[in-house]
Image (tube, rainbow, N blue to C red):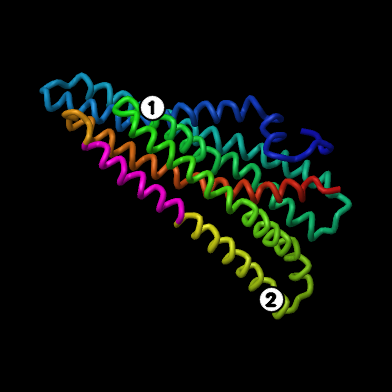
Amino acid sequence: MSSLQVISLASIVAGHKHKIGITWLLVAVENLLMALLPLFIGYSIDSLMAGQYHDVLILAGVVTALVLVAVARRIYDTRTYGEIRIQVGMDTDSRLRERPVTTRSARLNMSRELVDFLENELPPLLTAIIQLLVTLTVLASFSSWLALNAAIAGLLMLAIYGLFHRTFTRLNARLNNQTERQVSVLSALTSSALQTHLRKLKNREVKLSDTEAALYGLIFMVLFGFVLGNLLLTTQLETPSAGQLFAVVTYSLEFVEAALLLPITLQTLSRLTDIRERLNAQ
């Protein structure tokens, strides 16, 4: 990635597509195995109740593979993204060479957030997407109504986030503006200026947190309705086995867990949109 190229999530991925591709492959395999665990546990329950152990051995193999992939990914990720941070930092500084030191310092730190997102927050997002897709598939295998209930909940969550997106973008821009003033405030060498700066940072972070809390509350209400709906729909299944009941309940709860990751990730993307614009400003 050259210093003249736009610095963004897309350009970072394109400039390191092979390395990042390996991490995404490992993430996909890890989370697919993780998502399938409740199904294999359900099969194992039914097998054990029938006095058989074949499905238990399969479950043990899946868990072993999951552990090996998870460990390998974390070892590989740390080294790969560490090198990418160095390259992105150098590219960022080259673009901002004519800017004041205060701006360069703040935006150099911001540039690391792009790589941090790829390493720390994109895997949970992929986890959530894979979990949601597997959940829809498994629930549909038991009843189309269970899957439809999950799909409706997912669409409602996206609609709710859409109402908050502009607010998140505006609040993140204000927080970044204040962050860029930090070096000049420290240069003033007055405790009153620093206290004012820190208080402004706190106020902006509080407003962001309050907005996140409101979004989280609305989405949680949607998910609570989804779980209650699936519990009622489960009672309509024809003579479900213990393993099937376990799988339906577990996948419904995992749908909730995965869905709650989405608003957090989408809020981060709103912040990164503002950061990308700052890094590429002329």
Magenta residues, as a range?
A: 218-235
Does dot 2 land on a helix, a strand or a loop?
helix
Res 67 visible: no
Residue denoted by label 1: 137
Q: Main secondary structure of the magenta part?
A: helix
Of tags 1 and 2, the one toward the viewer is 1
Q: Is residue 11 above or below residue 93?
A: above
x, y (%) of residue 42? 24, 30
Residue drawn at x 43%, y 39% as measured from the top left: 152
Question: In the image, 110: left or right of 64?
Answer: right
Q: Residues within 10 Å of mark 2 (few under 14, many from 20)?
A: few
Q: Is residue 75 above or below residue 188?
A: above
x, y (%) of residue 92? 77, 45
Whole-angstrom CA distance, mark 1 to mark 2, is 53 Å
Q: How many marks can you see?
A: 2
Residue drawn at x 72%, y 34% as measured from the top left: 11
Q: Residues within 10 Å of mark 1 (few under 14, many from 20)?
A: some
Res 183 visible: yes
x, y (%) of residue 7? 75, 40
Q: Is residue 229 covered in magenta?
A: yes
